[in-house]
Amino acid sequence: MKKADKIYEEIRAAILDNKIEPNAPLSENEIASKYKVSRSPVREAIRSLEKEKLVTIIPGRGTFVSDLNRSDVSHLYEIRLALATLAARTSLNFISDSELEALAKRWTALKEQQSESKIEFWQVVSDLNRETHHCLTRKAPNPWVQSFLSLIEVHVVRMANQSMRSHGKIDEIINYHLELIRLAKSRDVESYIKCLSDHIKVAEKYMLQSINIE
């Protein structure tokens, strides 16, 4: 793996997991010193992060982790709702019962061992949330839908990690996913899409509550 790719992947993961907070500065010199590299691969990594809108470069001031405001959240979730429901509807017939059953077992296991106070537990919830939605949409036959979904996925992941820990109720999160999987398995398309839409709207509500903007 190229040095720039390694730096990019590690900083990207830290931003998505909220280990580096919004508006935090990223110093090229400090990053270069940490990874024992010149500033060239650091700049390359930062340019990649900028393309994903995870960082903002302000001339004369430096590089900062991008913030999320109410307008950003509303716009992203509007797109997510449209694309995710379209992808879910068109991919439903391509998802096997065994895939859905495996996901249901993992959510049920989380329900039995839930602990809202442990950061490690929330990370497991976050990872399974991401994996579940990926399973429900990744087989959509329209490659453009997949492409556009991937563009917003990084920000949805970042927002989900922030909002679930701040306002998410673990029972509600688990029950939504179990019901979503049940409806997907039943192939009741309209009920399945309604449940997914409701879930996305609730996720948006929690995200708006979690950001500090009046």
Image (cartoon, rainbow, N blue to C red):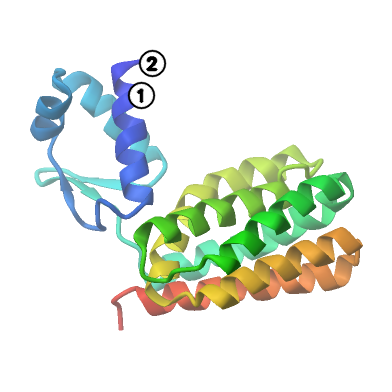
Q: Position of residue 135 (x, y in %)?
A: 70, 47
Residue shown at the point (57%, 62%) measured from the top left: 110
Res 89 seen here:
yes
The label shown at residue 125 is none
Q: Quadrant of residue 72?
A: bottom left
- Residue under the image location 22 percent in, 27 percent down: 42
Task: Tell me residue 186's x, y (percent).
Answer: 90, 63
In this view of the protein, which residue sits in the foreground, 156 or 75? 156
Position of the N terminus by quadrant: top left
Element at label 1:
helix
Residue 1 badge = 2
At x 58%, y 77%, the residue is: 172
Residue type at mark 1 is Asp
**Residue 111 position (above or below residue 101):** below
Q: Amino acid at mark 2?
A: Met
SS type, badge 2: loop
Name the residue beneath numbered marker 1. Answer: 5
Task: Single out the residue that lies furthest toward the bottom.
Answer: 214
* Residue 145 in the figure: left or right of residue 35: right
Q: Do callouts 2 and 1 mark residues in contact (Cβ within 8 Å)? A: yes
The single residue placed furthest to the front in the displayed view is 112
Residue nearest the observer in this picture, 67 or 15: 15
Q: How many marks?
A: 2
